[in-house]
Every structure is written in C-alpha cells, then in structure tokens.
Amino acid sequence: MKRTMMSLIGVAVALAAVTGVAAVAAPDTGDRDDPRGSSRLPVQRSALLCPAPTSSEVGETAYTAFAPKGAAAGADGKKGTAELRPAGTVRDAGGGAGGKGKKGKGKGAADSAAGQTVAPRDTKPVVPLQEAGKPVTTTTDSPDAPALVGAADGTLAPGWTVQQTTSVAAGSGRGLLGLSCTTPDTTFWFPGVSTATDRQDYVHLTNPDATPAVVDLELRGKDGSLAGSAGEDISVPPHATVPVLLSTLTSAPTTNASLHVVAREGRVGAAVQASDSKLGSDWLPPAADPSPSVVLPGIPKDATSVRLVALAPGESDADLKVQLATPTGLITPAGLETLHLKSGMTTAVDLKDLTKGEAGSLVLTPSDKDAKAPVTAALRVTRGKGAKQEMAFIPATRPVEKRATAADNRDRGSTLSLVAPEKGKDAKVKVTASAGSGGGTPVTKTYTVKGGTSLDAEPPRPSGLKGTYALTVEPEPGSGPVYAARMLARPQGGLPAFTVQPLPDDRGSVLVPTAGQDLSVLTN
C-alpha cells in the first residue's frame, strides 16, 4: 500500500509561495539570527485599517502613507500598489456614526449590531503610494470623514505604514490625536480605558474583509469582569466600521479598566478613541500581546502626571519589579519597588511626575525571574497644568526586531525615544529620515543605547526637507533588544498638545523554511 504525505515544512513553503503574507510564519522570537534551514523573505501583502478620525467641526486630519525602500521585487516583477478606501459605518446605539451625539442609555452594542450601515459618500483611494521611500500625504477637515480600509502588495507591502494625525482646536475633544493605522487581527488588549462620567471612550471595530466578523467585548475592572452581556455578538459588516461607546457596556462607571476585544468570526482592526472633559483626547492603540515582561517607551521629560494601568489576564497572579529606564540607568520609583497584579483584575497606580524632568521608559519584569504569568499594561501621560493639560497614551509594545517606521514627521516637533531594557546588552540602531513628501534627500544617523538606559533625541531630518517625512528604525547586527516610540508635539496656543506612537517591529518579513525535501513521498 502506498501513501503520499506532504510534510509540514512543505505546507509552509507552499503557503508562503502562494500568499506571501506574514500569517504563514511564526512571529519573531527576539533572536537576531534566523534559524538554520529557513530564509527571511519580504511579505507580499499587508492590510491596514484607519478608524473614523473625529466628529468635530473644528478638526483637521492628516493621513501620511509610507513604505521603506529595500524590498525585493514582487513575484510578478511589478512594484505593487498601496492604498486605502473609505469604509461604511454602522450607527452605534451609543451616539451615532463616528461617535456623535449623546451617550447611550445602557442598550449597548447589541443595538449597534442591528444598526444601519451608512455607505461612504465616495470610494476614491486615499493616500495611494507610487513608490517606496517617499511619503504621500493628504488632509481632510470633514466631520464625516469615514474609516479607511486597504491593502498593499508587491514591493510596497513590507513595512507599509499610515499615520493618522488629527488636530482639534476646541471642545471636549480638543488637542492632538495620533494613531498608526492598525493591522487586522482576532484579539486585542486595551489597558487604560474608562467608562467614568468624565470620559467618553469609543472602541472602533473595522472589518477589512468581504465576510462579516463577530466580536465580543469584555471589560475588566479592579474586581474583575464588569457584569453585562451588551458586548457580546457584535456584528461588523464587510468593509465597515462599528463604533461602540464603552460606557454603554456596563452600569458601573469605572475610571481604570481594561478592554479585551475578541473576534470569534473573521478579523477586525481595533483602536480606542478616548475623550476627557479636562485632559483632551487621543487614541489608545492596542497593547502588545501579554507577556511576562513588558516595556512602555517614550515618557516625555516634562510629564506632569503618569498613570500605570496593568492587568494579568491569565489564571495566575503576577508580581512585577517596576523600573524606569533613564539616560543614566534603571531606577526604582519611590514607594513602588514591586507591583502585585491579581489574576483577571485591573490595577492602576498613580506615578505622578515620575520622570522628574528627565525622559524615560517604564520596564516591568517578573520579581521572580522564573515566573511566566503574562501581563499587559498602558500609561496615561499628561503634560501641562490647570486648564492647559493634554493627555496621551503609551501601551506596552513589541521590540524592534528588524525594522519599525513612524510617518508624519515635520520640520520640528518630533522626539524619538529608544530604550535598551537589559543591562549589559547595548543597542545599536540605524535611524533613517526618508525623503520629504514634497522633496528632500534622506539622511541616516546611528545611535548607541547602553543596556539598561533610554535615549531621547531630536531625530535626523532630510536635507532640503519639503513636506513631511518618515523615520525608519533598524537595529544593527548584534544589537541588544531595543524598543522605540515617537512623540509629536504641536502646541495649540498655550496647550501642550502632543501624541505618542509606539514603534513595534513592522513584521515586513517572514521566516520561510528552506525547501529541501519538503514534498516527500513516504512508502509503506
């Protein structure tokens, strides 16, 4: 009897050849050297989702798209395409399309599932890229600007990045809101959300695919799960977005909570827009997947208030050592040598003016080095005083393994934060400022970050800059682990308006097993 069997390696190679997407390979593990018997290849397709930016009549949003140079030609020899298109909107029971109107009355997301899908007025491409290495930008001041869905392929797929930056001049949502448009997935964690009366937090769920997605939302407070079934079975139609007001999911207002988004069918992109009556508004991006150690990079030196919100989502409690990586080394915040997290319960700690005039990054590691309980965390950071305060969020982020990119940098106002969290493991990083969207010559600078320290720097700018430019961060061979973030500061009168974007690895390449004897025929 003869039997034909395709090996698992053969399956992986076949999938990679057909799809060329990151999903066929496991995520990077942190090793700088690729395993034997495998090759690193650029992805051939990427997807991004940008939520509806604002409903304010006095808001303006800039979209900046960029793809780094250096990817090999696509399988068909073409350079590829990269563009976004407007999505439909499902009106939310918590206040209408895009988060307009008044708060909901407790009906929650169940009504949004049955809501009407409003088609976009126009489906023309937004920020279509023509070439790698040069940003493309466009702006809108429409309060009805829709969510965007799109994809890139060929040479424009690896590292494709779109930054959405919104400036709101007045109102409860005033300030600067920034977001690196998200990739679709099936699960997201958002420590730091709120359902309190002084906050309006909307989670925007966007479906990039041609089939419906079904999503569950779970809120966890200091005592565990916040009771309520309003966040179950939310239907997100194809190529559409559903904004859900989090306060409609529970009858118990909670200042510090964690949100878990799970797509039971299909996949979505998710981001939380938080608006505070006193502190303005900003986007809270999803945190990195829970892990025993987390790094939160890029706390500005003039932060007047820092709040840590953390959660151990697994079945075990977590005891963490809390350290601030400063330019001179790791220090322990006064009175917070360790932090105990109860399983499934959200813990919040007020770190006040943690940085004391010196920029830093927060590093959380197990008190017992052998402990494996996963944790997730985010910071709410405030600058300014009195009526002139502005907030931003810094979630835990992935390390930069191969490359990370931040778009929408101007002539001034950008700060690059790099942190090498492990003592004795220095990080050496190449930072490239791209050509400008309107002209300019790229510039590269190399930074060395001593292990156990952080570095804040005004990044390089392209010579002869016109328009906006992108920053690409690439660890050199042999570098120690490094994490990165970028702060944009664009003051509005006396308001210190700012936003912080973490720079996780772009996963623009995947490990594919070498062919060898992949398609083996076994005979009995």
Image (spheres, helix red, strand yellow):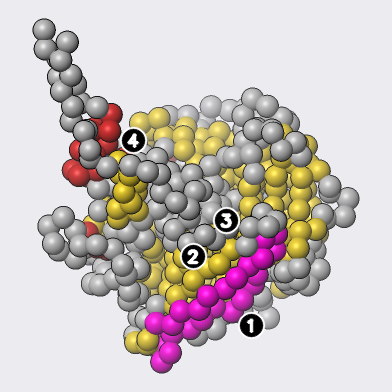
User: Which labelled disc corresponds to residue 493?
Assistant: 1
Q: Amino acid at mark 2?
A: Glu
Q: Amino acid at mark 3?
A: Pro
Query: Does the segment drawn in magenta span residue 189?
Result: no
Q: Is there a contact, CB below 8 Å, between mark 3 and mark 4?
A: no
User: Which labelled disc corresponds to residue 449?
Assistant: none
Number of the front mark, 4 or 1: 4
Q: Residue furthest bottom?
A: 464
User: Distance of mark 1 from mark 2, alpha carbons?
Assistant: 41 Å
Q: Earlier in the sequence, mark 2 or mark 3?
A: 2
Above or below for 22 versus 392: above
User: Which labelled disc corresponds to residue 476?
Assistant: 2
Q: Amino acid at mark 1?
A: Gly
Kindly tell me whether residue 47 is visible in this rendering. no
The quarter of the image holding the C terminus is top left
The local crowd at label 3, few if under 14, some if 14 to 19, many if 20 or more residues have their Cα within 10 Å, is many
Q: Is there a contact, CB below 8 Å, between mark 1 and mark 3?
A: no
User: Which labelled disc corresponds to residue 266?
Assistant: 4
Q: Which contiguous range is marked in magenta?
A: 442-468
